[in-house]
Amino acid sequence: MPSPPHSPGQNHLLAALPAAEFEPLAAHLELFPMPLGHTLYEPGGQLRHAYFPTSSIVSLHYVTETGASAETAGVGNEGMVGVSLFMGGDTTSSSAVVQTAGHAYRLERRLLQQEFDRGGVLQHLLLRYTQALMTQMAQTAACNRHHTVEQQLSRWLLLTLDRLPGRELVMTQELVASMLGVRRESVTEAAGHLQSAGYIRYRRGHIGVLDRTGLEGRSCECYGVVKKEMTRLLNNVRHREGVATNH
C-alpha cells in the first residue's frame, strides 16, 4: 500500500492556520526526513529551525552529567519542536531526539519569529500549544516521581499511540527505558505484566497495543490530565478547508 503524500496539513498546528497566514510560510517550509535517533538539538546549542512533525515523534529529554537521561515530553503531529525560538531564548537545556522515524516540516528561526511577532493566529496557536506542552512536562515529572514503572509505561504508550495512525510502535525496551529514565529490567517486568494481561504484544523491537481500554485502566491519572489539557487548549483548532490531515 503506497504511503500518503506528504503535506504540511498533516501537522495540526500548520493545518489550523488560515490561508492568509499559511501561504506566506508555505514556500519556506522544508520537508525534512527524521530518522530514528537523529538529534535535532543538544543542550546549549543554537536552535536554527522550528520543526513541525507530521509522521515522526520527537522526544524532549534531559541528560545528566553521567549520561543518564529521561524524557520530559514528546512532540508529534499535534505540535512543534523549538518553542524557545519564540519564547525569548535561542537555546535550551534539553535535547530533542527522534524517537519514531518519519518526516517533519522545518522553518528557519528568523521566519518563525517574524510570523510570530505579527500577532496573528500563529502566535495564538503557538502560545496555547506551549501551555499544553508545559502541562505535559509538569505531569511527566510528577509521574516519574510518584507512580510505578507499569503506570509510567502505560501512560507513555498511550501518549505515543495518540500520535500514530496505527496500533504498533517500533521501539526497543532499551529505548523505552531511556525515555522513562529507569532500568531496562524494570521495563521488561512492566511490559511482561501488560502482555500477560492481554493489553500489549511485544516482540523484539515492536510493541503492539491489543487492548487500549485495558491499558488506560493500568495507567495513572497523568495520561488523562495531559490528554484533557491538550484537548481543552487545541480542540477548537479549525483546519483549512481541503487540507489533508492524518486524523
Image (tube, rainbow, N blue to C red):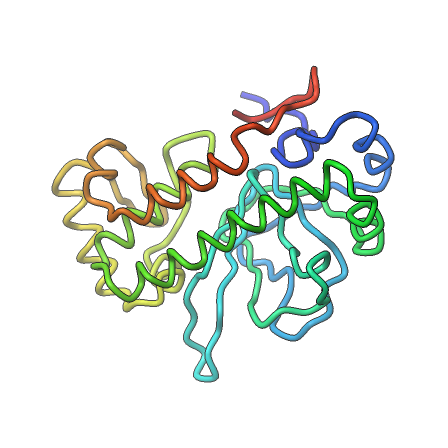
Farthest-out residue, top:
242
Specify whether 10 is left or right of 68.
right
Image coordinates of residue 215 in percent, x first then y, are 23, 39
Q: Quadrant of residue 45?
A: bottom right
Image coordinates of residue 60 in percent, x first then y, are 52, 59
Q: Residue at x 55, y 68 (%)?
A: 94
Specify whether 90 is left or right of 103.
right
Q: Residue at x 39, y 59 (%)?
A: 175
Specify whether 227 is left or right of 25.
left
Q: How many marks?
A: 0
Q: Residue at x 72, y 31 (%)?
A: 17
Farthest-out residue, bottom:
65
Front residue of 132/150: it is 132
Image vertical order of residue 124 relative to residue 172, above or below: above
Q: Residue at x 31, y 47 (%)?
A: 155
Front residue of 194/71: it is 71
Image coordinates of residue 169 in percent, x first then y, are 39, 42
